[in-house]
């Protein structure tokens, strides 16, 4: 990867808003805020602040990295829509990065990765060496098979680590910083636009009320 690569990464897939600017082989500036709502309004402001802190020109970006989930439906749509629009306006690629990849970045041990899921459950992915499991949903009290000596990382990882009797470790990078770093390595090989990583149907369902008859 060339040192002149510059990437903006951001994520609003959970109850947070984060952005990071990567240039010269490292993250130069970053910001993160916990928030349950208001990401759509805060994200553009935060990006402007991060770019200003780095004294960087958004028009000189090589690529954009964006978190695609799993996570909150609305939050995922906010950041992906913004990434697609910004990438189109700048004529650069947008790279979707799933949050399990972001959690695992910089770790060299077997891992049990977890993200919060509805109703006190967790989305789980097991990484043992080069082997990466499918994402499953786990609820405390149920069995889970994982490699001996694995560490646990992710949202509410203390709950999962305590249940499994394994060591809990913090992620090496904040989500947006990890996303920017990963996108800096992937953007030249990325063809498809980022799309949401949804693991369950949306809570909203079509109305059961019959549609009105249109008289022509």
Image (cartoon, helix red, strand yellow):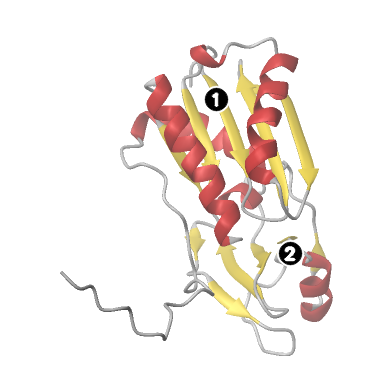
Which residue does the numbered mark 1 point to in the structure image?
Answer: 7
Element carrying mark 2: strand
* Mark 2–mark 1 distance (CA, rounded to whole Å): 29 Å
Single out the residue that lies furthest toward the left. 216
Tell me the residue at 76%/33% (across/down). 31
Question: Can you tell which of label 2 and label 1 is closer to the viewer?
Answer: 1
Rendered image quadrant of residue 20: top right
Q: Residue at x 57, y 27 (%)?
A: 8
- Quarter holding residue 57: top right
- Quarter of image, res 55: top right
Q: Is residue 64 visible?
A: yes
Q: Residue beneath label 2, please? A: 152
Residue at the image position 83 percent from the left and 68 percent from the top: 158
Q: Is residue 198 left or right of residue 157?
A: left
Q: Residues within 10 Å of mark 1 (few under 14, many from 20)?
A: many
Q: Residues within 10 Å of mark 2 (few under 14, many from 20)?
A: many
- Count all numbered tags in the image, as a single digit: 2
Q: Secondary structure at mark 1?
A: strand
In the image, taking residue 38 as reference, residue 186 lies left or right, namely left
Q: What residue sits 65% from the left and 27% below the top?
A: 47
Nearer to us in this view, 75 or 206: 206
Q: Position of residue 33 (x, y in %)?
A: 79, 42
Which of the two labelled residues, at mark 2 and mark 1, occupies the earlier sequence position? 1
Where is the C terminus found, in terms of image quarters?
A: bottom left
In the rendered image, residue 130, in percent from the top left (x then y), is placed at: 49, 56
- 13 displayed left or right of 198: right
**Nearer the observer, 36 or 121:** 36
Q: Residue 80 location, x and y as percent?
A: 49, 44
């Amino acid at each position: 990867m060339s040192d002149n690569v510059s990437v903006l990464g951001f994520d609003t897939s959970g109850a947070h808003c984060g952005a990071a600017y990567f240039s010269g082989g490292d993250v130069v500036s970053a910001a993160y805020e916990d928030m349950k709502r208001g990401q759509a309004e805060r994200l553009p402001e935060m990006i402007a602040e991060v770019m200003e802190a780095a004294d960087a020109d958004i028009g000189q970006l090589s690529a954009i990295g964006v978190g695609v989930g799993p996570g909150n439906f609305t939050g995922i749509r906010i950041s992906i829509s913004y990434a697609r629009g910004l990438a189109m306006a700048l004529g650069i690629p947008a790279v979707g990065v799933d949050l399990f990849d972001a959690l695992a970045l910089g770790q060299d041990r077997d891992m049990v990765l977890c993200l919060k899921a509805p109703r006190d459950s967790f989305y789980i992915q097991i990484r043992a060496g080069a082997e990466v499991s499918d994402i499953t949903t786990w609820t405390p009290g149920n069995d889970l098979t994982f490699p001996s000596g694995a560490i646990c990382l992710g949202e509410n990882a203390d709950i999962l680590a305590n249940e499994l009797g394994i060591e809990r470790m913090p992620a090496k990078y904040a989500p947006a910083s990890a996303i920017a770093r990963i996108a800096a390595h992937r953007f030249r090989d990325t063809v498809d636009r980022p799309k949401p990583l949804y693991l369950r149907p949306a809570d909203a369902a079509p109305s059961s009320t019959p549609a009105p008859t249109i008289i022509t």
